[in-house]
């Protein structure tokens, strides 16, 4: 009688190094280890170029195994986390470790600025990729052969996946679990970790003020504060120009030079953020449209679809599913590519 063999585990290798961001490491580790506890075939390994202890950017020390321990083995998923300093300087030995593990991996992924390590290793040439919104311009400038998507939570191109800032490692890891083990198990992992299985929107959902460069022009800074303080007020171009004491043309040029957007585009982004906050708080779609300054239900719907890829009603439904025992997460596709501005 032939003995039935159990399937081999899927080895998930997380590559740490001195200065690595702690959450970039631990978020995927939690997802895959939780999935393993629920019956998935994952075996997680924490590696570093030289093995031993590495010190994270938070000061926490992690004990790792050397890359050579898995270099001759088949790795299912390689995860390269980011670090605050990685866009400017790649730690010694990291690129060799990335290339070595990539050569024996079925798929290779990065979290946050880990995309810079993949790029420097030559793995993103001619591919689509993303990274933390704060560093997308740097990645584009340094590697013009990469199609950088500054809004996606994560991007898949072939067997390489890149994800956005920090907590996006959770989104990516959950998507990979879903692709490997199916929607039900991925949903159970998300429920255990109390996170969305699929986060609505892209990086553009994050605070407008946080991702806006500080303007050098004092008048422009005052305008931005007034827009944020009262999104529903009259912020038409003629009115903004009147308050600034500038011509509409001059004001538009200032916005483009210092903010990287038109006055209308910036106002719409602030109103979208206000609308999200109102929906999160339980306001109706109609009230949200009025209070955010977007005006009508139809305008609100168009703005949500254009920027977040979901309707206001679908977005609001997300926050009605946070009651205990309720789950209405839809399936997550293997590629998250929200509509960009």
Image: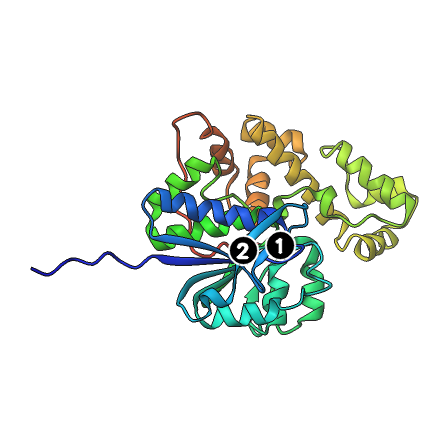
Asked if residue 228 lies left or right of residue 304, the reply is right
Of mark 2 and mark 1, the one earlier in the sequence is 1
- Residue at 88%, 54% in the rendered image: 250
Decide: is 207 above or below 317: below
Question: Splitting the image into 4 quarters, where does residue 280 fall?
Answer: top right
Given the current orientation, which residue lies at the most extreme front position? Answer: 52
Question: Splitting the image into 4 quarters, where does residue 299 fall?
Answer: top right
Decide: is 148 above or below 112: below
How far is the residue under mark 2 from the one under mark 1? 7 Å
Q: Are marks 2 and 1 in contact (CB under 8 Å)?
A: yes
Q: Position of residue 56 (x, y in %)?
A: 65, 50
Name the residue tied to disc 2: 64
Q: Nearer the viewer, residue 52 or 152?
A: 52
- Residue at 61%, 51% in the rendered image: 165
Name the residue tied to disc 1: 54
Asked if residue 21 lies left or right of residue 194, the reply is right
- Residue at 86%, 43% in the rendered image: 221
Q: Position of residue 91 (x, y in %)?
A: 67, 64
């Amino acid at each position: 009688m032939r003995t039935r063999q159990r399937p081999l585990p899927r080895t998930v290798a997380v590559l740490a190094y001195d200065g690595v961001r702690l959450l970039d490491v631990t978020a995927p580790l939690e997802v895959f280890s939780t999935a393993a506890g629920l019956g998935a075939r994952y075996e997680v390994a924490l590696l570093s170029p030289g093995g031993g202890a590495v010190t994270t950017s938070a000061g926490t020390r992690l004990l790792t195994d050397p890359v050579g321990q898995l270099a001759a083995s088949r790795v299912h998923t390689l995860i390269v986390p980011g670090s605050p300093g990685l866009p400017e300087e790649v730690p010694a030995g990291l690129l060799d470790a990335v290339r070595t593990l990539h050569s024996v991996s079925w798929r290779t992924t990065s979290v946050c600025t880990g995309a810079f390590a993949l790029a420097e290793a030559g793995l993103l040439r001619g591919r689509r990729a993303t990274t933390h919104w704060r560093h997308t311009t740097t990645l584009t400038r340094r590697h013009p052969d990469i199609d950088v998507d500054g809004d996606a939570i994560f991007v898949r191109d072939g067997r390489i996946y890149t994800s956005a800032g920090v907590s996006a490692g959770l989104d990516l890891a959950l998507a990979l679990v879903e692709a490997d083990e199916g929607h039900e198990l991925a949903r159970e992992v998300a429920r255990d970790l109390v996170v969305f299985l699929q986060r609505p929107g892209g990086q553009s959902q994050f605070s407008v003020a946080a991702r806006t460069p500080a303007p050098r022009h004092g008048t422009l800074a005052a305008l931005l504060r007034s827009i944020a303080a009262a999104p529903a007020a009259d912020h038409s171009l003629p009115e903004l120009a009147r308050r600034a004491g500038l011509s509409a043309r001059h004001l538009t040029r200032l916005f483009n030079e210092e903010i990287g957007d038109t006055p209308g585009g910036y106002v719409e982004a602030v109103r979208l953020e206000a609308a999200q906050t109102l929906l999160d708080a339980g306001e109706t779609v109609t009230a949200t449209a009025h209070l955010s300054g977007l005006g009508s239900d139809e305008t609100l719907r168009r703005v949500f679809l254009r920027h977040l890829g979901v309707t206001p009603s679908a977005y609001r439904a997300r926050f009605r599913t946070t009651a205990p025992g309720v789950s209405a997460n839809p399936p997550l596709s293997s590629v998250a590519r929200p509509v960009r501005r």
